[in-house]
Amino acid sequence: MTRYRYPFLSLKATNAPVEDALAEAAARVIRSGRYVGGPECEAFERALGDMADGSIAVGTANGLDALRLIFRAFIEQGEMAPGDEVLVPAGTYIATWLAITDCGLRPVPVDTDPATLNMDTALLERLVTPRTRAILTVHLYGRVCYDDELRRVATRHGLKIVEDCAQALGARAASGRAAGALGHAAAVSFYPTKNLGALGDAGAVLTSDARLARTVRALANYGSDRRYHNVYRGLNSRLDPLQAAMLAVKLPGLAAENERRRALAAVYDSAITSPHVTLPDCTAGEAMVWHQYVVLCDTRDGLRDYLDSCGVETDIHYPAACHEQPCYADIPHGPLPVAESVARRCLSLPVGPGTSEQDAREIAEIINQYIPR
Ligand SMILES: *Cc1c(COP(=O)(O)O)cnc(C)c1O
């Protein structure tokens, strides 16, 4: 039991509405005798690919592996080599960067756009060097980061566009195209807290490139293209059928879940009037699926303590930019003032399935009473 009147996120509340269907699907897998690969995985991959505008989906063990596999595949196909550079936001979850460095590639951090809290695409052009091979765009907090400038830079310099879609499944770019179908390949995470969460770790790669999909699938299966024939020094990172079955139950509910999050964001947007907090842009429509509702506050820690004392549980995504993490102390970079400032000022409010619109109104009222000290 949580001590909070307004918990940040309850995974139990997330899965309660489909509990019976999940149990039934789990029983089906148990009785099938098929515990790696097989029809459960194939069915979910098809449903996921359809949702992403007819992409090919390859299930993986988690979202980080999905990203790693994409870069490994580009390397195996001779399109990138260790030492090459990848443009990536400084303000993202650490896994985005880990995928790059794990493949021997070099992250080149891009500062944050203060209006969207996504990568500032106006900065991309001047960061391109002869070693740049890709832009790893992150749809942070569920907001699509893909615009004409990003596409122009990628096209001009022949860069791959890779999407970190871990927080934005179900979102659509302004063009109407699905997140996950905007670049050459995309990584999805089904970590239990994501908008579509498994009951454990799971992930997927999305791409419309059949060759890349084949390479990813082989790499994820010991590098073998057929049994006992290993073309790559691969890894074992497959989606397991139990999680595929759980996800197949939940996938049809994703659109409604994203809509529910939009409604909550709209409540916060109209009800929070405190001059001490800056609200996120609420006009993005379908380009935003509100994985997090993040406000900025100059006295963030004070606001967080105050909310805590009022029974409102909050979280911080993320308290440090990636280049500020000890493991990346050696990564060269230019000034990244916005990413650093956002890390000090950001605070995530509850938007999960356990939070009602009435809760959001009450939380807004509590925030409006906040006096910085
Ligand atoms: C969750 C997340 C990942 C990693 O996914 P896992 O399934 O936890 O490995 C990568 N990038 C972002 C932006 C994420 O939020």
Image (cartoon, helix red, strand yellow):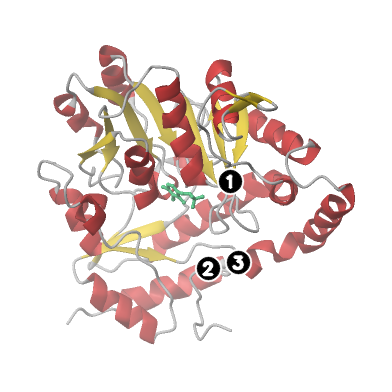
Rounded to the nearest whole Å, what is the CA distance between mark 1 and mark 3?
20 Å
Left or right: residue 115 versus residue 256 is left
Residue depicted at 70% across the width and 27% down the height: 227
Image location of residue 351, percent across then percent down: 50, 62
> What is the spatial separation of the Cα atoms under label 2 and label 3, in whole angstroms?
6 Å
The answer to which of marks 1 and 3 sits earlier in the sequence is: 3
What label sits on residue 11 in the rendered view?
Answer: 3
Residue in front for this viewpoint, 107 or 300: 107
Q: Amino acid at mark 1?
A: Ala
Asked whether disc 2 touches disc 3, contact meaning CB atoms under 8 Å apart, the reply is yes
Q: Position of residue 108 (x, y in %)?
A: 22, 36
- Pointer 1 residue: 61
Q: Residue 9, which numbered label?
A: 2
Give SS at disc 3.
helix
Q: Nearer the viewer, residue 272 or 345?
A: 345
In percent of width and height, residue 67 lies at 45, 38
- Going from N to C along the chain, the mark reached first, 1 or 2, is 2
Image vertical order of residue 356 relative to residue 318, above or below? below
Q: Helix or strand or loop: what does disc 2 sit on? A: loop
Q: Sort mark 1 into few (<14), some (14-19) or many (20+) by Cα contacts within 10 Å.
A: many
Tell me: is circle 2 under 8 Å from ligand 1.
Answer: no
At label 2, the amino acid type is Leu
Hey, what amino acid is under mark 3?
Leu
x then y, percent, for residue 166: 48, 45
The answer to whether residue 61 is above or below residue 217 is: below
**Dots 1 and 3: beta carbons under 8 Å?**
no
